[in-house]
């Protein structure tokens, strides 16, 4: 929008100067320019609504197998949101450049070098950020989230633009010797595009990196997580084991040649107070916290710190500790629980309480029974209890599960392998839907590329006309344009691949504590797709510039 609006303002300069010579005031010229901008924005928004409806229909078709019923048609609300969003963004990004149209001096009719002062970059950026921030706040209802999105977007764009600008400057200083005219001129021409070329490069690279992140890095992270799990990671869960059944279950394991697993007690209880203050869902602003306090907790007891748990605060209790709890630090952070707080629980009509003796970091992906809250042994005696266990069932022992269910029908089994396969299937389908949505970011980058090509169309036509006059053939000019856009696409693919690989590394190593091995196909697909897409859009956008006779261009005042 900003690139197109700036180009529109430059093209309107001559018409505005002529109207000023014929008696029109600067305010009248400005009102006409703003009305034209609004009309274009209105029709563009209506076209966008039609395309959005088609895109929504396609997304519904993609997700049709997820739901038992047919998805409903969108209401009128989203259309109103889309229309308002389009106009607000248009004014935010395009109004400041258009305001300069009313300041064009009438003398420009005779002296083409005269024009209004260019729009302030800071004012343009402020208006754009205000429009984006206002829409984000309106849609999310969360000021902090909106600021994070705006800040993260700014950092990303600045970094990408800086890298793109550095690459463009490198091309401008490169003198490829021994190459043909088309490649030599195309590469030098790309280097001379300056900030506008960097905008094109950053926009296409940003959209492409998003899709690469979803298509490749997401799979790499899942594979790295699976490789991080030990070979004997439990793949079966058994719950609802009664106290009197534990010895029989152990004997059944031994009868099938399997090692008996550890059993963990589990008591269902509801958190009712923290430091004597009643716990109510409405007292929490966080949605996850409200859900947690509405449900019952799975409580357990243990004399030793469980494998996969690590103390981060406090100490594990000694044998003389009468009453106390060890709490997972994640749920403690969510519910505002601190070391030394007194928690009150209620189960089966019985109330009990104890002090938080320690906070634990729990590795929930170990596929072993873990609990948010663990009590001192003996503290939960007399409460209804059942037992839970997890175990690794190697191939060739499939008969064990039916035997366990026949002997103890009340025991519930969960096949982790099948659950993970279902989860992965859901993730794959969800990623396809997200890729469908984020493909619009790549389309937006290509539109920025086309808008930048259109903004420089007059200068490009004159440049090509001079080359034609000096003897260059149309074939050489097409080769030069192809070289320029192919190089732009290669650089965009490199930026996108590097960004996706770097983000994948950061996520794997610093967020998920995984070893990351990037897929080499990411670079191949990134560079190839960037080259083909940019080349196609670039050649399409400049097709007319090659066909225009040089004499027509050189005689034109533009």
Image: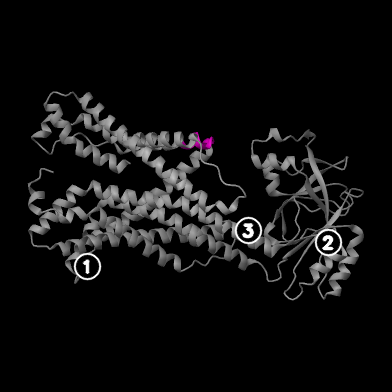
Does the magenta-highlighted stretch encompass residue 53? Answer: no
User: CB under 8 Å between callouts 2 and 1?
Assistant: no
Q: Which mark is residue 434?
A: none
- Tell me where residue 178 appears, x and y as whole percent: 19, 72
> Toward the viewer: 226 or 419?
419
Between the C-alphas of marks 3 and 2, the distance is 26 Å
Q: Name the residue under label 2.
A: 263
Q: Is residue 355 left or right of residue 191?
A: right
What residue sits 43% from the left and 58% below the top?
499
Res. 195 visible in picture: no
- Badge 1 element: loop
- Tell me where residue 233 appears, x and y as whole percent: 70, 67
Q: Mark 1 points at which residue?
A: 176
Above or below — where is 273 with respect to 65? above
In the image, the segment drawn in magenta is 134-143
Q: Residue 423 carries which label?
A: 3
Nearer the camera: disc 3 or disc 2: 3
User: CB under 8 Å between callouts 3 and 1?
Assistant: no
- Magenta stretch, main secondary structure, is helix
> Toward the viewer: 512 or 404?
404
> Closer to the N terminus: mark 3 or mark 1?
1
Between the C-alphas of marks 2 and 1, the distance is 72 Å
Q: Quadrant of residue 491?
A: bottom left
Nearer the camera: disc 3 or disc 1: 3
Between the C-alphas of marks 3 and 1, the distance is 52 Å
Q: In which quarter of the image is residue 352?
A: top right
Q: Residues within 10 Å of mark 2 (few under 14, many from 20)?
A: some
What residue sits 52% from the left and 58% below the top?
506
> Closer to the N terminus: mark 2 or mark 1?
1
């Amino acid at each position: 929008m900003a690139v197109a609006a700036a180009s529109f303002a430059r093209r309107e300069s001559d018409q505005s100067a002529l109207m000023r010579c014929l008696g029109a005031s600067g305010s009248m010229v400005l009102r006409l320019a703003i009305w034209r901008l609004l009309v274009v924005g209105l029709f563009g928004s209506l076209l966008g609504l039609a395309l959005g409806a088609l895109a929504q229909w396609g997304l519904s078709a993609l997700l049709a197998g997820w739901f038992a019923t047919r998805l409903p048609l969108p209401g009128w609300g989203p259309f109103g949101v889309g229309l308002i969003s389009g106009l607000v963004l248009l004014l935010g990004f395009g109004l400041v450049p258009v305001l300069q149209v009313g300041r064009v001096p009438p003398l420009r009719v005779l002296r083409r070098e005269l024009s209004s002062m260019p729009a302030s970059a800071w004012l343009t950026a402020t208006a754009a950020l205000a429009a984006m921030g206002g829409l984000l706040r309106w849609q999310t209802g969360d000021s902090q989230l909106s600021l994070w999105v705006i800040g993260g977007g700014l950092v990303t764009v600045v970094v990408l633009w800086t890298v793109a600008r550095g690459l463009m400057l490198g091309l401008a200083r490169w003198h490829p010797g021994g190459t043909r005219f088309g490649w030599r001129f195309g590469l030098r021409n790309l280097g001379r595009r300056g900030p506008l070329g960097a905008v094109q490069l950053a926009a296409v690279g940003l959209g492409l990196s998003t899709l690469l992140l979803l298509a490749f890095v997401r799979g790499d992270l899942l594979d790295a997580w699976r490789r991080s799990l030990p070979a004997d990671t439990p793949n079966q869960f058994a719950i609802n084991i009664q106290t009197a059944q534990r010895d029989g279950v152990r004997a059944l394991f031994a009868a099938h040649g399997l090692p008996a697993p550890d059993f963990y007690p589990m008591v269902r209880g509801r958190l009712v107070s923290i430091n004597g203050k009643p716990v109510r869902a409405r007292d929490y602003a966080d949605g996850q916290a409200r859900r947690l306090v509405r449900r019952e907790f799975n409580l357990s007891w243990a004399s030793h710190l469980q494998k996969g748990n690590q103390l981060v605060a406090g100490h594990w209790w000694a044998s003389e500790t009468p009453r106390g709890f060890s709490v997972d630090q994640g749920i403690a952070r969510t519910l505002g629980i601190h070391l030394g707080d007194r928690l009150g629980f209620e189960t089966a009509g019985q109330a009990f309480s104890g002090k938080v003796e320690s906070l634990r970091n729990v590795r929930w992906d170990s596929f072993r029974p873990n609990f948010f809250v663990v009590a001192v042994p003996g503290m939960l005696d007399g409460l209804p209890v059942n037992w839970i266990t997890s175990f690794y069932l190697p191939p060739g022992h499939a008969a064990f599960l039916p035997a366990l269910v026949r002997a103890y029908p009340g025991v519930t089994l969960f096949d982790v392998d099948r659950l993970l396969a279902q989860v992965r299937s859901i993730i794959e389908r969800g990623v396809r839907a997200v890729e469908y949505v984020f493909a619009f970011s790549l389309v937006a980058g290509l539109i920025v590329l086309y808008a930048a090509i259109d903004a420089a169309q007059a200068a490009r036509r004159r440049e090509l006309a001079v080359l034609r006059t000096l003897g260059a053939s149309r074939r050489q000019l097409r080769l030069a344009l192809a070289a320029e856009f192919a190089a732009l696409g290669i650089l965009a693919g490199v930026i996108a691949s590097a960004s996706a690989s770097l983000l994948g590394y950061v996520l794997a190593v610093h967020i998920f504590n995984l070893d990351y091995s990037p897929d080499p196909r990411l670079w191949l697909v990134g560079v190839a797709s960037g080259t083909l897409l940019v080349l196609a859009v670039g050649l399409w956008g400049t097709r007319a510039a090659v066909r225009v006779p040089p004499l027509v261009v050189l005689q034109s005042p533009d």
